[in-house]
Image: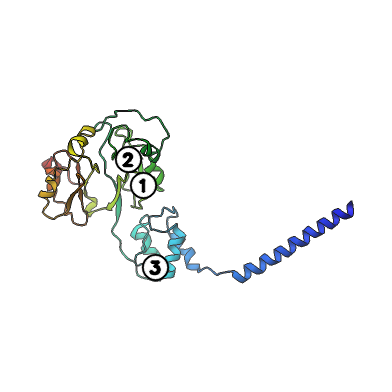
């Protein structure tokens, strides 16, 4: 019995040793030396692996930059131009300036503006609630307020307001990575240019229903009247499926559309108080 045990142990040990040798030889044969510059670039990146750059994570972006030998079309929105400038300095290449962006919430269906008609009692997930119904307000385009966008942000830049029930973006933390936008099942959150002096003008509604139905569910819904389209001197506003959209690449922020909107669906952010009072 002892002899059988000894033979078994010796056999297993021999198999283990042979397997280890095979693995060692294979590792040496197929080993690929990683460019040490990749590690240096990774150290400079935020490390959140948010995917805002279009790659699976920070290391994938670092590998792409080092392999390309330039930054054309490669940018980390979370780190911004400052981070990219540091990477460029380490690699000895030219840095490309990218337009800073932030997330905006295109819904004003707050607790006050869009009172609940039913009570949702289910899993705390926008994606799940969206698959079941139009939501508590009856607006099938409005924010569900269950915080999927919060979970999608790697930088703590978005939260749900207890007062309004809507997401609030902390622009000091937001780098426009789009993590929140990708998690929103209704496409309410959009990444737009931060704008000169941090000013932005956008339609805070994506409701595609006809005016009467939209207004029934939300007091400040876009009713698709088209007045903003007619008053815009730059052709920056289009009307599609009963709601208006402002192209931030064309908008000159004259604020004429804000004054013209009958429901207050168009928001002007970070403009001087006096200017806001004049157009209200």
**Is 261 positioned to the left or the right of 26 in the image?**
left
Near mark 3 (Cα within 10 A), the count class, few <14, some 14-19 or many ≥20, is few
**Is 124 positioned to the left or the right of 108 in the image?**
right
User: Tag on residue 280?
Assistant: none
Near mark 1 (Cα within 10 A), the count class, few <14, some 14-19 or many ≥20, is many
- Callout 1: helix, strand or loop? helix
Q: Which mark is first along the chain, 2 or 1?
A: 2
The answer to the question of whether label 1 and label 3 lie on touching residues, with beta carbons closer than 8 A, is no
- Residue at the spot x=32%, y=66% of the render? 96
Is label 1 or label 3 in front? 1
Q: Give coordinates of residue 6: x percent, y percent.
A: 85, 56
Near mark 2 (Cα within 10 A), the count class, few <14, some 14-19 or many ≥20, is many
**Real-space Cα separation, disc 1 to disc 3, in angstroms:** 31 Å
The answer to the question of whether label 3 and label 2 lie on touching residues, with beta carbons closer than 8 A, is no
User: Tag on residue 180?
Assistant: 1
- Residue at the spot x=37%, y=43% of the render? 149
Residue under label 3: 89
Q: Give coordinates of residue 86: x percent, y percent.
A: 39, 63
The answer to the question of whether label 1 and label 2 lie on touching residues, with beta carbons closer than 8 A, is yes
Residue under label 2: 167
- Callout 3: helix, strand or loop? helix
Q: Give coordinates of residue 220: x percent, y percent.
A: 20, 37
């Amino acid at each position: 019995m002892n002899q059988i045990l000894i033979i078994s142990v010796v056999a297993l040990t021999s198999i283990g040793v042979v397997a280890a040798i095979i693995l060692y030889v294979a590792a040496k044969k197929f080993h690929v030396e990683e460019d040490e510059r990749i590690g240096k670039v990774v150290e400079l990146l935020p490390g959140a692996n948010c995917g805002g750059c279009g790659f699976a994570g920070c290391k994938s972006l670092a590998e792409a930059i080092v392999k390309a030998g330039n930054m054309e079309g490669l940018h980390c929105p979370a780190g911004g131009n400052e981070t990219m400038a540091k990477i460029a300095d380490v690699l000895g290449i030219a840095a490309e300036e990218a337009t800073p962006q932030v997330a905006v919430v295109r819904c004003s269906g707050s607790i006050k503006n869009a009172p609940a008609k039913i009570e949702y009692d289910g899993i705390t997930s926008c994606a799940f609630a969206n698959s079941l119904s139009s939501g508590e307000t009856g607006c099938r385009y409005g924010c569900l307020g269950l915080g999927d966008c919060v979970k999608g942000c790697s930088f703590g830049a978005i939260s749900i307001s207890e007062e309004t029930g809507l997401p609030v973006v902390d622009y000091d933390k937001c780098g426009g990575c789009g993590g929140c936008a990708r998690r929103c099942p209704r496409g309410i959150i959009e990444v737009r240019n931060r704008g000169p002096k941090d000013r932005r003008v956008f339609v805070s509604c994506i409701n595609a229903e006809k005016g009467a139905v939209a207004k029934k569910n939300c007091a400040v819904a876009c009713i698709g009247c088209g007045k903003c389209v007619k008053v815009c001197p730059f052709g920056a506003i289009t009307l599609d499926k009963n709601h208006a959209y402002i192209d931030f690449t064309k908008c000159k922020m004259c604020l004429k559309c804000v004054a013209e909107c009958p429901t207050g669906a168009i928001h002007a952010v970070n403009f001087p108080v006096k200017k806001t009072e004049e157009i209200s």
